[in-house]
Image (tube, rainbow, N blue to C red):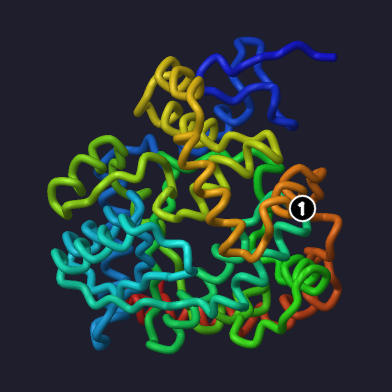
Amino acid sequence: MSSYQICSRCVYDTSIEDISFTAEGLCSYCQKYDNLARKYINIPKEEKQKQLNVILSKIKRLGRNQKYDCILGLSGGVDSSYLAWLAKDLGLRPLVVHFDNGWNSELAVKNIENIVTKLNYDLETYVFNWEEFKDLQRAYFKAGVVDIEVPTDYLIFAVLNKLAAKKGIKYILSGYNYATEFGMPKGWNISNKFDNKNLEDIHKRFGKIKLKNFPKFGRYQIFYYQNILGIETVPLLNYIEYVKKDVKHFISKELDWKDYGGKHYESVFTRFYQGYVLVKKFGIDKRRAHWSALICSGQVTQEEALEDLKNSPYDLELQKQDFEYVAKKLDFSQDEFNEILKAKPVPHSLYATENPNDFSWNFFNAVMSFPVRIRRKLRHIGATGKWR
């Protein structure tokens, strides 16, 4: 049995199943980050600004005759809150969309109200059908899989693209960024959050009601939105210098934003999932991923991260309250919920999955390759006014 080892730079260690280290002790995730940084992060500011200007020009040109030139999903978290401010500062006109899946904290609601009021944005709140969503979340718990956040993530992107299509908007602004989110280990979530077959099979086996209001967002739907309608998701934060500590201070001052005490803790469910379920059932502490990304981007030290990891993910009394609240809201008895969380984890691959080499899918792509190239060329001309 191999001995324990922790990366010489970040806080990933041999608890990660596919990790490897150089002779100097640098882990494979840090190596991947360094390769990515050379291409996209550690480039001259002038080059980044040039890339940002090109993107902004496209968004504004394609949206010039619309009320909104882009869509922005606002959770009330750090990334989306700053993205909302940045969009305004860059002269964009986003339709701000908030997704209410029944798990908002009171603080998240207040933060969102402050942001849209101060920035004078139109807010469209999409409320998920609770009975259907609850049934899907219950199914994921019963299935024993690690990525119980799939229903939320799947629906958010499905709705964003559906709204963009309905309103003729071509760009979706994303708060994803390399500086704070790069490097989730294999096995800590499902590799494809939009695997429609996996979702449907889990619900078929463990759900009880029909998902009548559930928008599909599998590979054929994604193909349609991206390649036929030309809807593009833009990670705008990757084109600026993004320092989390400074951003938190800035939005607190400018937008009266209040901190939640953890990444994605604006949602009661996500707080409980990341800080309790993943730790207790799967032995996964996502803080290692969040800290490692910040270490790689030079925002914190390894010592700071290791000191934090000595603490519980969040307050133990609040964990107990969350356990009781989540169990009750999902119609589980506390004993039943305990048994589910103690049961052996089950890989997503145990259930049906989309085969990337499926003949019908490859044939569809081959047939559509020529019209897709034509659509892309026309979209490029529309966005830039240039043939090349």
Q: Quadrant of the C terminus?
A: bottom left
The picture places residue 61, in percent across and down from the top left corner, at: 27, 77
Q: Look at 25% across and 48% down and name the residue there.
A: 258
Which residue occupies the foreground of this view, 133 or 361?
133
Q: Is residue 223 visible?
A: no
Q: Quadrant of residue 342?
A: top right
Q: Quadrant of residue 136?
A: bottom right
Which residue occupies the foreground of this view, 39 or 98?
98
Give the residue pinned by disc 1: 144
In the picture provided, is 333 more to the left or to the right than 237? Answer: right
Residue 329 vertical placement versus 253 (above, below)? below
Residue 114 vertical placement versus 11 (above, below)? below
Q: Is residue 312 visible?
A: yes
- Amino acid carrying mark 1 in the image: Gly
Q: Quadrant of the N terminus?
A: top right
In the picture provided, is 123 more to the left or to the right than 32? Answer: left
Q: Look at 32% across and 54% down and name the residue there.
A: 51
Q: Residues within 10 Å of mark 1 (few under 14, many from 20)?
A: many
Label 1 SS:
loop
Q: Look at 16% across and 66% down and name the residue there.
A: 119
The picture places residue 212, in percent across and down from the top left corner, at: 64, 87
The number of numbered badges drawn on the structure is: 1
In the picture provided, is 286 more to the left or to the right than 98? Answer: right
The picture places residue 307, in percent across and down from the top left corner, at: 44, 18
